[in-house]
Image (cartoon, rainbow, N blue to C red):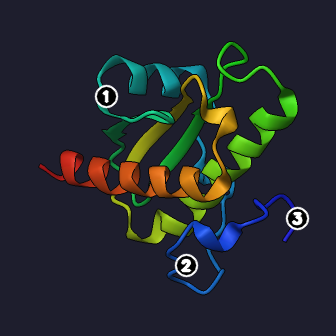
Amino acid sequence: MPGAPKDANDCQPDILGGQERFGRGLRLLRPAEFKRVFSRAHKSTDENFTVLAIDNHSAHPRLGLAIAKKQVKSAVVRNRIKRIVRESFRRHQAVMPALDLVVLARRGVAEKDNKELCRSLQRHWSKLGRQCAK
């Protein structure tokens, strides 16, 4: 699969057998959408990522990425991290509530392997799903 992390199967679950998509409707595209999330979000943080989330009042979750050059110097590594985040989101979107999510990388994330990053993201998705459901 082009553009997928080398260990894409580590970003479980694959609810629909690989039929999920990550089209334009599943992305945060405009600055105003990002600003809305940053202004009043629920937050989940660990040593790898900070994930911000708010309800989006639509039928599906949407994802925005903010992987800063300050945190991850190499463009190659930034792109690897973005691929892992997108793949994890794509595989979990069927079981996630309708949220707008923004993922920020933390210092040191570049040294982590794909499996660890996928596990970290899976914890964020479930934690924010529970927080926003309340």
Is residue 98 shown to the viewer in this render?
no
Numbered disc in front, either 3 or 1: 3
Q: Is residue 37 left or right of residue 34?
A: left
Query: Identity of the amino acid at label 1?
Result: Ala
Judging depth in this view, the residue of 22 and 72 nearest the camera is: 72
**Vertical placement of 113 versus 20: above or below?**
above
Numbered disc in front, either 2 or 1: 2
Label 1: how many residues lie within 10 Å, few (<14), some (14-19) or many (20+)? Answer: some
Residue furthest to the left:
134
Marks 3/2 in contact by CB < 8 Å: the verdict is: no
What is the distance, in whole Å, between disc 2 and disc 1 at their CAs? 27 Å
- In percent of width and height, residue 9 lies at 65, 74
Q: Is residue 126 left or right of residue 63?
A: left
Q: Earlier in the sequence, mark 3 or mark 1?
A: 3
Q: Quadrant of residue 91?
A: bottom right
Residue at left offset 65%, top offset 27%:
67
Q: Quadrant of residue 56?
A: top left
Judging depth in this view, the residue of 65 and 58 nearest the camera is: 65
Query: Identity of the amino acid at label 3?
Result: Pro
- Rendered image: mark on residue 14: 2
- Rendered image: mark on residue 2: 3
Query: Identity of the amino acid at label 2?
Result: Asp
Residue at left offset 69%, top offset 68%:
8
What is the distance, in whole Å, between disc 3 and disc 1 at their CAs? 33 Å
Q: Secondary structure at mark 3?
A: loop
Q: Secondary structure at mark 1?
A: loop
Q: How many marks?
A: 3
Residue at left offset 73%, top offset 17%:
69
Q: Label 1, on which residue?
A: 41
What is the distance, in whole Å, between disc 3 and disc 2 at their CAs? 17 Å
